[in-house]
Image (cartoon, rainbow, N blue to C red):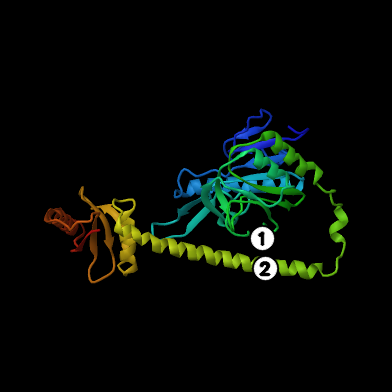
Amino acid sequence: MAKRLRVISINFPFQNSEVVQESTLETERALFDFDVVVIRPQRFNKINGDNATYRAIEAIMTTKSVELNSLFAQGGVLVVLLDVPEFYKTSTGGYSHGSVYSVNNYEFLDSTFATYIRSGSGQQISYSDPAEPFVAVLKKSTVAWTAYVARIPGHPFNDLRFFASAGAGTAVGGKMPYGEGHLILLPNLAQLDETLFFEACAEYRYKRQGSAPPEWINRVSLPGLQVMESAIGSLDKQISVLQIAREEAEQRREERVAFRKLLYEKGKTQLEPIVRRALDDLGFETKPGETITGTNYEIDGRTTKGSTPGIIEVKGSKKQIPLDEFSPFVVKILADHQATNIMSKGILGRL
């Protein structure tokens, strides 16, 4: 390894014993304590879950983002090995109620960066800058990309310059100055030439590092600079507004796509919530399933609006409802009437 080059790798194995290796970002090691940080974004075990897990992931991402800002301020190098983007989502309410919160596995960089990445695997690769040190690394390594940059990222990544692509309109390798340091994007690798990798990292960490700016430099006035900074601020606000609008549109799209589950899903976890959602959209305002008070009879939900309240029973199948499904349901309706003194209608659906 290059002299005095301290490296930590998150979720990517190295053979060199001097590399500090961690399986996840959930490490007490401060990332700014190193010259080079290598991160392959970790995939989540599941993409929908509870609020506690969401908050824990978000806290880790926030902490490591702050540490990486310090790394860049010190002239450090962050190498990100592109892998499948994933979003962990949680809701404050039921399927169709409450706010939805999301955190992604690239959020140590920025909350929006994952939106520029697409999943896709392959091995073909072409290079546009043969003098780039990391091109030499990739040529001597075994590339097995699992994700790619699908479009030019926005601020603060609009200075990325790509040197490797997987196909037309895609990129798997890029670089940009970040503060006093550098951000490097590389494709996922089945085998890495570690000697050349460390040499390339040393090139960026030491040889390409400029002089540290003096404290007074920001007080020097430059003609037109304030106008430019104001324009950037205005564009940042527009980007923020558009990003929020996009996330809202994406959420509406996901809610609409969920109706396809009516055609094939079954069971409590998937089918029952979307059936209640469909009834909600029709104006019936449903409640989740419950056990009728004082009985062992379980129902799949209730409707609260309409001429009379209703009890919901959902069955998943491609066939018609046989007669033997009606008798148990009638018993539930009568038991509920006895428990609540309200005669509810029965809604029996087989999808």
Q: Is residue 138 visible?
A: yes
* Three-letter code for the amino acid on which mark 2 is drawn: Leu
Label drawn at residue 155: 1
Which one is nearer the viewer's eye here, 44 or 53? 44
Residue at 55% in and 49% down = 147
Q: Is residue 28 visible?
A: no
- How far separated are the C-alphas under marks 2 and 1? 9 Å
Q: Which secondary structure, mark 1?
A: loop
Which one is nearer the viewer's eye here, 174 or 299? 174
Residue at 62% in and 42% down = 39
Residue at 84% in and 59% down = 218
The image quadrant of residue 115 is bottom right
Q: Position of residue 186 (x, y in %)?
A: 63, 46
Q: Position of residue 83 (x, y in %)?
A: 56, 46
Mark sitting earlier along the chain (2/1): 1
Q: Dot 2, crowdedness within 10 Å: few (<14), some or many (≥20)?
A: few
When the figure is inspected, residue 7 is found, relative to residue 83, above or below; the finding is above
